[in-house]
Image (cartoon, grey):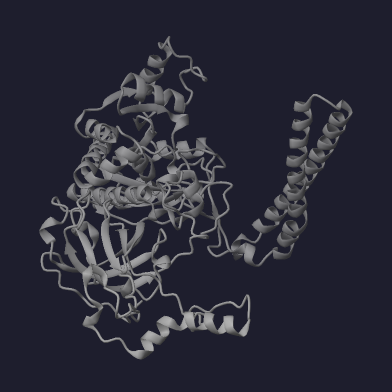
Amino acid sequence: MDSQPRPDSWDTVSAGLVTASSYTKRVVLKSLVGRSDGGLALVGQRVVIGGWVKSSKEVKKEQPPPAAIVPASLPRAGGEAAGNRDVTCTEIIQSRITIFRKIINALSGATNVPVREKTDSAIQKPTLPSPSTLYFLINDGSCVASLQVVVDSSISWLPASQLLPFGTCIVAEGILREPSSPGKHVVELKTEKLLHIGTVDPDKYPLSKKQLPLHVLRDHSHFRPRTTTVASVTRVHSALNLGTHKFFQDHGFQYVQVPIITSTDAEGFSEMFQVTTLFKDAGKEESEAIIDTDVVKLDVLKAAVKVKSQKVEELKRSESNREALVAAIRDLNKTNELASQLESRQKSKAENFTKADKSKIPEDFFSRQAYLTVSGRLHLESYACALGNVYTFGPRFRADKVENVRHVAEMWNVESEMAFSDLEGAMNCAYDYFKFLCKYILENCSEDIKFISKRVDKNVSARLELMAFNSIAKLSYAEAVALLQKIVDKTFETKPELGMALTTEHLSYLADEVYKGPMVIYNYPKAQKPFYVRLNDDGNTVAAFDVVVPTVGILITGSQDEERFDKLFARIKELSLPKEQYEWYLDLRRHGTVKHAGFSLRFDLMVLYVVGLPDVRDSIPFPRRWGKQLVD
């Protein structure tokens, strides 16, 4: 096989009708196979492409048989006379050498002597690989479609076996042409040069041609974007991001970055992640002691409990050897008791460590307790009171220890705040934004939506069209409860009552069964909403709203915020919130107060709604959830 040294650099290729990127010196596949004609008009163009192998095959080339030595007196194949070529004496002797050996052996009386048919048969000649043609489907992540790339094995500096595996990265230069065999491909690339080959180890590479379940891919978050499904979801995610900025910029909003680290609980009742540097220094030895002794022992005991529980279950199923079952249960109970005692002791040590640590807060990085923010709306208000309409987009953190397909520890929110606005204005803006995003995806991600319709949710296109062009139902919290109480053909796990929080089951029934589309619920009891929401005239409800959509539930949460100093101060006092945390926030009411309203869209749930996936962890590039050890 002819070998070609690996190039040190890639040359920029002029593509005529297509333009190579000035940053990567290649043509993205979307500009080739993503065209309406599938790239047919580009036949004959020279391009450089790069991507990862989605599928491959090798077709061996037929080799002509070696020419045989034929005696001069015999006719050649096809009737050609051998006399057309002179035969040398050496060739005649070589053709008769086997006969001469047999005669010599017979005269000498030798028997069972192996005959060497060829004098050079003992010499091991290197076996050269048969020439072949390699066919690849290459995808570079720019679109759903892949490009067929044809490579002659002779131009590769690596054997075909290292090019063929799923996931191999290939950069190739060649000519676009119509496929030699008609099929589903409109064009293919006839490779003239291989510029780069990034090999994979098939035994260790976690992905394969076979479609893997999404829950399996979560354990390989650094590789899963290479799958077609996750790549499509990511492109939709990116489009929703761009659509978000377009909507707010087109409506006169200014983009503001709000802090991720804050000393303020934006809701007054959140589970927050604390930010500290104290654990690096103070109490390090005690912290390590807790980890090195009790935690290790507790892990061992918990593992033993699991094993002994399985043994008990096996004995119960066997319905025999009752004495062994009683002994196993006694052993399991004893192990559980030891684990409980050790867990209690560990918790006590940790609490004592925390109490001792609090005394050193002035030595901490910020000289006070600091947290990862759960919402940016409080900080956003300060800019709304100067610029009018503002928005932000960033990560929000909640330390709730829950297992939920709609919640992880880090989720991104789009938040807006509008000065001189009220509850009605915020509700209208929120729903216009939601409708805009649905329409934007239909117009800008049509190929990905088609693929998602086949692979994930066949109703995704119809659902987005319905959301983009229909109006929305609005009802108060009291009306929603009354409606649920009238339902006779459905028994809810939690009976709906005034004053109680509507459960996921309640909201799903209203959105999926009653309205069969999105709806807005507003004027909630004040106990269910954050302290800063404006108190209504009845003194019991607040000007808050939720946009509820089918399959997902609450997607947008918004409110008109309390602009009256006395009402806000009374609410902070009523909830026993630390007043010093909110002095800066109260200042906005002391000086130049104004009516204002806003909302937060849970961006990751919006992606989930658009693509129809069941679990939010599959719509987030690197999900962080409770109980899951970080590996990336």
Q: Is residue 421 left or right of residue 485?
A: left
Q: Is residue 342 left or right of residue 125?
A: right
Q: Is residue 14 left or right of residue 157?
A: left
Would you place residue 76 above or below residue 446 in this image? Answer: below
The furthest residue to the front: 107
The furthest residue to the right: 323
| Front residue (pair 232, 367) | 232
Q: Is residue 429 visible?
A: yes
**Residue located 38% across and 45% down the image:** 604
Q: Quadrant of residue 468?
A: top left
Q: How many marks?
A: 0
**Residue located 29% across and 43% down the image:** 451
Q: Is residue 385 visible?
A: no
Would you place residue 472 above or below residue 58 in this image? Answer: above
Across and down, in percent, residue 339 comes to 78, 43
Would you place residue 344 above or below residue 536 in this image? Answer: below
Indicate the quadrant containing the N terminus: top left, top right, bottom left or bottom right. bottom left
Across and down, in percent, residue 534 comes to 37, 34
| Front residue (pair 508, 170) | 170
| Front residue (pair 56, 418) | 56
Across and down, in percent, residue 239 comes to 27, 50
Q: Quadrant of residue 323?
A: top right
Across and down, in percent, residue 132 comes to 33, 66
Q: Is residue 312 left or right of residue 488?
A: right
